[in-house]
Amino acid sequence: RSSRGAKGNAKLETALFLDEAGYKLFLPYFEGKDDQLRDMLLAYINGVQALYHHPSAGTRIDIVVVRLELMKNQPKDLPHYGGERGALLDSFCAYSEKTNSPKDSDPHHWDIGLATVGGVCMPRYACVIAELGSTNLLGKPYPSAGFTSVYVLAHEIGHNLGMHHDGSSNSCPKDGFIMSPSRGTVGETQWSTCSKQVLGKLSTWADCLYDEPTMSEPGYDHTKYGDKPGEKWGAKKQCEILLRDHDAHLQDPEKTEDICQTLKCRTPHRAGYYFSGPALEGTSCAVNKVR
């Protein structure tokens, strides 16, 4: 382990699982190519890391992917309970604990967890679930669909790192930041001062985040995106992922200055338009300007 006086950046060693439902949902968009689906997930994780590298966080956290699994078939010991989140979380926590190496020194051990506040270093709670392609009964994407899920996952990781919702057990406003108790598709791209304070205290208790440096497994290195996944996965691509439709595009391509707050997408195959975003870091949002 690193000494307490010279720990450097916290490192969140992470295993990423895309369940069978997610796999079957996105694979047609990628024309059956697992490598392209995997690349999208790496961009997704890099978008989360970009938020933990944002100046408003105060303390930088690096995300190291030590495992990435596309579940072509749902494991029998990982029932999904029809997506009911409480039961699914319990199911995945049990699966994660059984699958994860019990030794924190093992380079294939991961740390991440969901919803259990401060549970990041507890093996039983080392588990996160986040929606990525959820829609309502009419097929309209929820605010957690597509790359907007970057903010959802960052929020849930925040809980596991000890954060409460803004406005709950703290004096921060409940709206306007990543730890807001509700998530829309507009703004909320920075950390509140309450979240910043929690991150600043990690080195005093979360020893599992300060192991000796671990390298990402070959093929799992999301840092190739440089905290700017929007450079490759631009605004049009983000609309495509939201709707899983190659013909999707921005509603008003000439009004790119708005995408730092929200993306307004449409497709010729559906009526109306659909909101996503805010755009990923690195997305071109105006002439000579990127998000």
Image (cartoon, grey):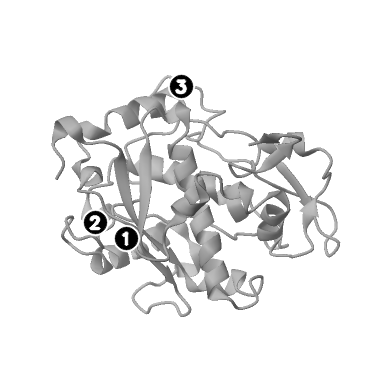
Q: Is residue 264 left or right of residue 8?
A: right
Q: Are marks 1 and 2 in contact (CB under 8 Å)?
A: yes
Query: Dot 1, crowdedness within 10 Å: few (<14), some or many (≥20)?
Result: many
Separation (CA) of disc 1 from disc 3? 30 Å
Q: Nearer the viewer, residue 182 or 236?
A: 236
Query: Dot 3, crowdedness within 10 Å: few (<14), some or many (≥20)?
Result: some
Report x, y in % for residue 246: 75, 65
Q: Nearer the viewer, residue 168 or 57?
A: 57
Report x, y in % for residue 277: 65, 44
In the rendered view of the protein, which quadrant contains the N terminus?
Answer: top left
Disc 3 marks which amino acid?
Answer: Cys
Q: Are marks 1 and 3 in contact (CB under 8 Å)?
A: no
Quick one: SS at disc 2? Answer: helix
Q: Residue at horizontal 81%, vertical 38%?
A: 255
Disc 2 marks which amino acid?
Answer: Arg
Disc 1 marks which amino acid?
Answer: Cys
Mark positioned earlier in the residue sequence (1 or 2): 1
Q: Residue at horizontal 39%, vertical 45%?
A: 157
Mark positioned earlier in the residue sequence (3 or 2): 2
Q: Residue at horizontal 39%, vertical 23%?
A: 170
Q: 287 above or below 11?
A: above
Report x, y in % for residue 210: 22, 43
Q: Residue beneath label 2, please?
A: 124
Q: Residue beneath label 1, please?
A: 93
Q: Residue beneath label 3, please?
A: 172
Tally of numbered tags: 3
Evaluate whether residue 145 shows in this view. Answer: no
